[in-house]
Amino acid sequence: MKTPLKIASISALHQFLGLKKPSNPLISVFNFDEVKLEPETILSSVTTDFYVIALKKECAGGKCKYGQQYYDFDEGIMYFLAPHQVLHFEDVLLDSVKGFVSIIHPDFVQGYPLASIIKDYGYFSYSANEALFLSEKEENSIMHIIENISTEIEANMDSFTQDLLVSNIDLLLKYCDRFYNRQFLTRKKVNSDLLSKLENLLDLYFKNEKLLTNGIPTVQFVANELNLSPNYLSDMLRVHTGQTTQQHIQNRLIEKAKELLSTTTMSVSEIAYYLGFEHPQSFHRLFKNRTSTSPLEFRQSFN
């Protein structure tokens, strides 16, 4: 696998893409139409030191694949990158791509509340797994905000400029968050299939007694098995079930624990180790928190 192209500054990205020097070294918006590269330039992977928010509208001359799978949507498709993440392309000719790119250096939002919450937007870790698909109406809403950001960047800077830009960035991220939650619902069939796959995965894990040999399955393990990012999986489950992946795994553990407590003579400590807990106290604490009764009290209720 080739080493990703590392781009440390917004100015360096502009230079690489043949764009004019950015008006502000910490924030920029450009259209793919403005990119000036050799026609046959192919980029396989890239990593940056800044946030990237991009909307792809067309992609000819190569495969546009965002994540582990292809999707059945023809509308605009957005992807998001946090600093130091890697975005992979599959034989994409950059001069054939249509859409916009908004790039924001973390230093630009320092001193604003957004600096501490921007990483809470889970879609910044979806980039290698799940893109955002926009309806025409949603795309228009996004483009309106992007145009406001672009206009403000190019205007003469005054004491209001940074405040207005940060406000628009915050608004853009909130809209994207809304549209991602809509996507969880409109892609109900796809997400129902994922729920079934998750249940089957945990069923197999429990039946093969991997709890005893490998321990409790982690969120990262489950997400990897489903070709999703941990954040996307948890967000999807939260929308459809009201619980995160971690809570979902814990539910299955409690179900298995109840089965063992009511149908076997194994001690509580033996059950704890069988279920992958390193310490019986951890099992006891989780069971009581989730059922409001201790494992021993639960067992005694069957006598």
Image (tube, rainbow, N blue to C red):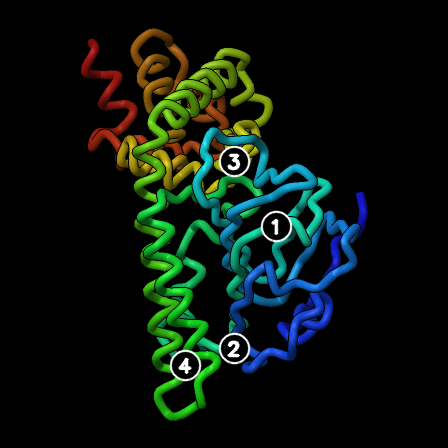
Disc 4/disc 3 C-alpha distance (Å): 33 Å
Mark 4 neighbour density, 10 Å: few (under 14) some (14–19) many (20 or more): few
Q: Is residue 127 left or right of residue 287?
A: right
Q: Nearer the viewer, mark 2 or mark 1?
A: 1
Provide the residue designation for mark 3.
Answer: 228
Quarter-of-image position of residue 196 = top left
Disc 4/disc 2 C-alpha distance (Å): 9 Å
Q: Nearer the viewer, residue 47 or 294?
A: 47
Q: Nearer the viewer, mark 3 or mark 1?
A: 1
Q: Residue at x 35, y 81 (%)?
A: 163
Provide the residue designation for mark 2.
Answer: 107
Provide the residue designation for mark 1.
Answer: 97
Disc 2/disc 3 C-alpha distance (Å): 30 Å
Disc 3/disc 1 C-alpha distance (Å): 25 Å
Disc 1/disc 4 C-alpha distance (Å): 35 Å
- The tag earlier along the polypeptide, 2 or 1, is 1
| Res. 17 in view | yes
| Res. 8 in view | no
Question: Which residue is farthest bottom?
Answer: 158
Q: Vertically, is 111 above or below 252? A: below
Provide the residue designation for mark 4.
Answer: 111
Q: Residue at x 26, y 29 (%)?
A: 294
